[in-house]
Amino acid sequence: MSFVKLTASAMAIAAVSATAATARDQVQVAGSSTVLPYASIVAEAFGENFDFPTPVVESGGSSAGLKRFCQGVGEEHTDIANASRAIREKEIKACAENGVTDIIEVRIGYDGIVFASQIDGPAYTAFTQSDIFNALAPKVMVDGALVDNPYKQWADFNPDLPAEDILAFIPGTKHGTREVFEEKVVAAGCEATGALEAMIAGGMSEDDAEDACLAVMADGRAVDIDGDYTETLASIDANAHAIGVFGLAFYENNTDKLKVATMAGVAPSTETISTGEYPVSRPLFFYVKKAHIGVIPGLKEYAEFFISDEIAGPDGPLAEYGLVSDPELGATQAAVSAEDAMMN
Amino acid sequence: MTDAAFPDGAEGAAPRTTSSLLTQDTRTKKRNAAEARFRAYGIAAIAVGLVFLAVLVSSIIFKGVGAFQQTFITLNVELLEEKLDKSGTRDIEAIKKVTTFGYNPLIDAALAQAIADTGIENPFSKGKDLRKMISSGAAADLRDHVIENPDEIGKTVSFRLLASSRVDGYLKGRVTRESLARDKNLTPEHLDIVDALAGAGVVTKAFNTDFITGADASESRPEQAGIGVSMLGSFYMMLVVLACALPIGVAASIYLEEFAPQNWFTDLIEVNISNLAAVPSIVFGILGLAVFIQFAHLPQSAPLVGGLVLTLMTLPTIIISTRASLKSVPPSIREAALGIGASKMQTVFHHVLPLAMPGILTGTIIGLAQALGETAPLLLIGMVGYIASNYPDGVIEGFMSPNSAMPAQIYEWAKRADPAYYERAWGGIIILLVFLMTMNIIAIILRRRFERRW
């Protein structure tokens, strides 16, 4: 017994002292689960091609990643935050309070959000933003008046859609994807159907009306998915008449189970997203702590490698996985090599 | 005598039928029938349980066994000097400057050559399209080999390269020509080539040791992913749990059982221990985050922290089972020892503890097995969602360098987009189950061998 105890404590002490002595030599990355696959592809290639160790990549969500990123400067804090949205004013302030002032913003490319359904299910092949709004909003426009949503089936408001009960699996509110879904689909549909105008005419302030636009019905037709796209896929598998919201890359890896719908007449693909024709897309970012460049070995090399043409260009492995490469990649490369921090 | 207790007993009734024991009266029959029914219920319950177990185990094995086989493509790659070492000086730094992307054309050429050798027509003019059959990790294999053996530049070397996950899936029956119709990762024409290459023995399936010993890979190469690194993470956590939970647990139970006075305070402790055993494990994760990471500033994702959190979770199990096995040692042993003049401590350490040891070890192993399969507390200390792609630098570093754990790795695979990862997740479950079964079997053997009945 005492021997076990002795070895145990000796080992624990050795472990603690060993790490206290050695400095961190690998880049630490945390953040968005949407950016994670891309970051892990880059980290792997980085480890293969450089003498630096493979960077450590963790997920946890854009907000959580930025929060950790903003906790301070020093080896115990992360060097890079991945985000599926731009950093907020509030977060920049929180960063500054902890001494994280020079932040380099790197846009790696674009990600498309698609609407897909079971491959053998009803023919959901073409949606417009108005269709989604009419299906999910609590108040919609019928014959020029704003009324409680009377629709039960897709065909009730658009005869081109199948006569199936409305059921949509949408990203939960903790996901960055939800923000894009609301902004680019629901809000756009609200405006297109005239509901926004009617709300303002009805005495709402513009801000209130815009917020009211984003509401979805709480009668079970819109189901929030807080997990990953695999959970949405499982739900779609179990409900033939449902539609789900996915990232383009996820859809492209599961084309044998899903069929995708066009949005406003445009089929989602890396081409239509890069030209801006497909309306539902968003930029993806990562943020680099400038104070760590030169302290953590390989940090700048990793950032430069990430956005090099070989990796993030249209023929690179990221595009192959589903990232829509940024047409202005050259400008980003220049900004990173010059270590241009954000203005704040 | 007893007849007196039944005043109007057998008075007017017919004389008692003297029947043989072999013929049963109705009441006996009823009783026997009830017993038979009860046995049938029991057998039915066991049968239902066994059916569920069979369904579970067979579906796990059916879905996961594919992960232990992997498709390889054996290619003779010509390591062209003008691509890999333009200067011709074999300077290692110059060779290192060629990135993995520089090796792709060599693989393309070798693959095109292999296809030409089989005599099948190659419909792909671009090497990039052809290369979809091979894992994107193949170039790194080549590069590592060249950097280790720079003198082989200019020669033709045979490499066994991983096939891409779609090709692998095709040979395992997971991917069909129909399912590829809209897939941009591979086309049916590729499969024709795969058929031809398989006929020529270039494409082969083999046991996948890398799945058991390898590191996790990125989402674009499921064929390369292995559970080895997270297995190490689990191993280090178990070491920490064993080193912390066993001494603390056993010391606490010995004191409570043998030395502590019976009063309201020890009762309170007892109630709390039983309570803790039933607390949801995520609570220990929250506690671990607050105490070990935010207060003590231990690093995120470290197996040391994971092990400490799991120690908290396992302690009540160990204490309860240790106390039970101490209790089961008959008091006569203690009295005999005390009677011949042993001190209280000598009694405990020379007599009671050795006799209780099999029970203590069984409890500890079962507690460890429980900790091995636990994911929830790891969620909050950053061990879930971590990509376990690096081996720790050394034996001691293994405690502190970020890592994942086996159940967390399975969860991570299950949520990835590529369907090939789904198979890996089930394969991981098989490995985890093998570990759990081994531990439980060891526990049973220990108990059988050393247990003494009184």
Image (cartoon, coloured by chain):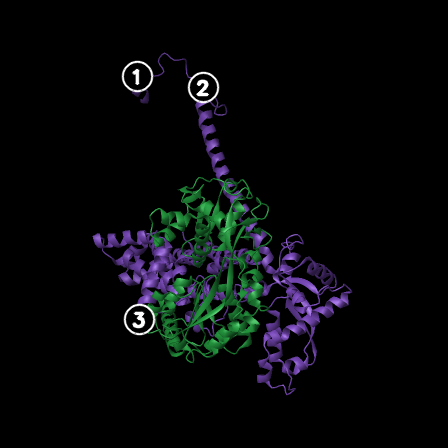
Chain colours: A green, B purple
Looking at the rendered image, the disc whose residue lies closer to the viewer, 2 or 3, is: 3
Q: Mark 1 and mark 2, same subunit?
A: yes
Asked whether residue A97 is in view, the answer is: yes
Which x, y percent locates residue A144? Answer: 43, 43
Q: Which quadrant of the view contains residue B115?
A: bottom right
Looking at the rendered image, the disc whose residue lies closer to the viewer, 1 or 3, is: 3
Q: Residue furthest right?
A: B119
Mark 3 secondary-structure assignment: helix
Please, what is the three-letter code of the amino acid marked with disc 2?
A: Thr
Q: Is residue B38 above or below residue A254?
A: above
> Mark 2: few, some, or many residues within 10 Å (few <14, many ≥20)?
few
Q: Which quadrant of the view contains residue B31?
A: top left
Please, what is the three-letter code of the amino acid marked with disc 3?
A: Glu
Residues tagged 1 and 3 counted as in contact (Cβ below 8 A)? no
Q: Mark 2 and mark 3, same subunit?
A: no
Mark 2 secondary-structure assignment: loop
Which x, y percent locates residue B197? Answer: 72, 63
Q: Which quadrant of the view contains residue B222?
A: bottom right
Q: Is residue B445 above or below residue A237?
A: below
The chain letter under disc 1 is B
Q: Which mark is residue A97?
A: 3
Front residue of this view, candidates B424 and A337: A337
> Mark 1: few, some, or many residues within 10 Å (few <14, many ≥20)?
few
* Quadrant where the image shows the N terminus of chain B: top left
Q: Residue furthest left?
A: B264
Mark 1 and mark 3: span between their CA atoms?
A: 97 Å
Front residue of this view, candidates A271 and B396: A271
The chain letter under disc 2 is B
Mark 1 — residue?
B7
Which x, y percent locates residue B378? Answer: 41, 60
Q: Which mark is residue B18?
A: 2
